[in-house]
Amino acid sequence: MSDGIAAVGGAPVRSLTGVQIVGTGSYLPDEVVTNADLSSLGCDPEWIVQRTGIRERRHAPQGMTTSDMAVAAADRCLAAAKIPRQDVDLLVVGTLSPDRLLPATAPAVQHRLGLNCGAFDISAACAGFTYALATAMQFVAAGTSRRALVVGADANSRAINPHDVKTYPLFGDGAGAVLLVPGSAEQGALAYTLGADGAGADMLCRRVGGAERPYHCGAEEGSWLLEMDGRPVFKWAVRLVEESTRQVLDAAGLSTDQIDCWLLHQANVRILDAAIEALEIERERVVMHMDRYGNTSAASIAIALDETLRAGGIRRGDHLLMSGFGAGLAWGTLAWRW
């Protein structure tokens, strides 16, 4: 295990090996919402495809919560790992749509799974899974956790205004999970970076419901829902993916050709297309599922990882590149050896 490879652009790039993923799981609600289904809201189905690459997404039915989806994904992860639940000693949940403002969602997931461990949330929006993964890695590498369960889950359809025709079609609901355990010195994050730039906070936010603007302070109807200034967020994300990827790969001593599987946050196909062009990588190695699921926020990378692994697309020794980015503005990019 090593630390402090480099510091680039104010966000340090580090390594943390000796950690491995031994199980994955994911969950998508059954309800499929197509672009045509959204036409009644004034959304142009073809505009959605052309601008985002999204054709459909999943919405959680009434009564289903973020913790419900997190539990389902975690169940499948633990079954795949063949790890007894009593052995799980840490639970970290990344989400932007918690069941409640208080308490955190993780204790509800912990209780329903029958775990006996510490449990807490990470609030880093669409970078939530990479932040949660990096956090749990520290516990495992330090020897203070032997079996760490990491979940990314979001019920985005509850947090976005359905009358916002430019934003509402982009998002879907879902959850993904991984189980971390100690690994060999060659496994884990060969290099990773976590970064944030609070100057962009207003570009993607929910303004009402916190200490700054509580609900009771004359909030207008719907003002607690997500707002996004799409153009600057898009430009930032395109630049961020390329720059953070190059920084991490340089620190890891890897070329783009050595990455077997690219697991980039599924925000918009044009962001991924820009990354493919700028980094000159083969499109076939970039996992894409936003056409079927939309932007599932903290769940997107974990879902992509689970589906790829179950399809036989990841083998021991493979190199993965994971990059999550979103509100904060926050990002996390990791070069991972399986």
Image (cartoon, rainbow, N blue to C red):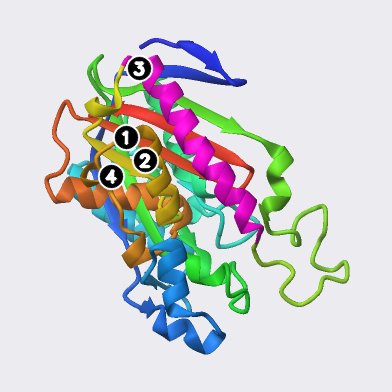
Q: Quadrant of the N terminus?
A: top left
Question: In the structure shown, which secondary structural element does the residue marked by tag 2 occupy?
Answer: helix
Q: Are marks 3 and 4 in contact (CB under 8 Å)?
A: no
Name the residue rendered at 66%, 35% in the picture. 197
Left or right of 268 in this view: 292 = left
Dot 4 alpha-carbon crowd within 10 angstroms: few under 14, some 14 to 19, many 20 or more = some
Name which residue type carries label 1. Glu
Q: Earlier in the sequence, mark 3 or mark 4?
A: 3
Specify the amino acid type for callout 4: Val
Q: State the separation of the CA atoms marked 2 and 4.
A: 12 Å
Marks 2 and 4, the one that precedes in the sequence:
2
Residue corresponding to mark 1: 280
Q: Quadrant of the C terminus?
A: top left
Residue 38 covered by magenta stretch: no
Q: What is the C-alpha distance between the residues marked 3 and 1?
A: 18 Å
- Picture quarter containing residue 196? top right
Q: Main secondary structure of the magenta part?
A: helix
Image x and y of residue 82, in percent: 17, 43
Decide: marks 2, 1 in contact (CB < 8 A)? yes
Residue 277 circle label: 2
Q: Position of residue 42 (x, y in %)?
A: 56, 84
Q: Which residues are magenta?
A: 228-253
Mark 3 surroundings within 10 Å by alpha-carbon count, few (fewer than 14), some (14 through 19), many (20 or more): many
Task: State which mark lies toward you, 3 or 1.
Answer: 1
Q: Between disc 3 and disc 2, whose residue precedes?
A: 3
The Cα atoms of the two marked residues, 3 and 4, are separated by 19 Å
Please state which amino acid type lies under the numbered disc 2: Glu
Which residue was labeled with disc 3?
252
Q: Is residue 144 above or below residue 130?
A: above
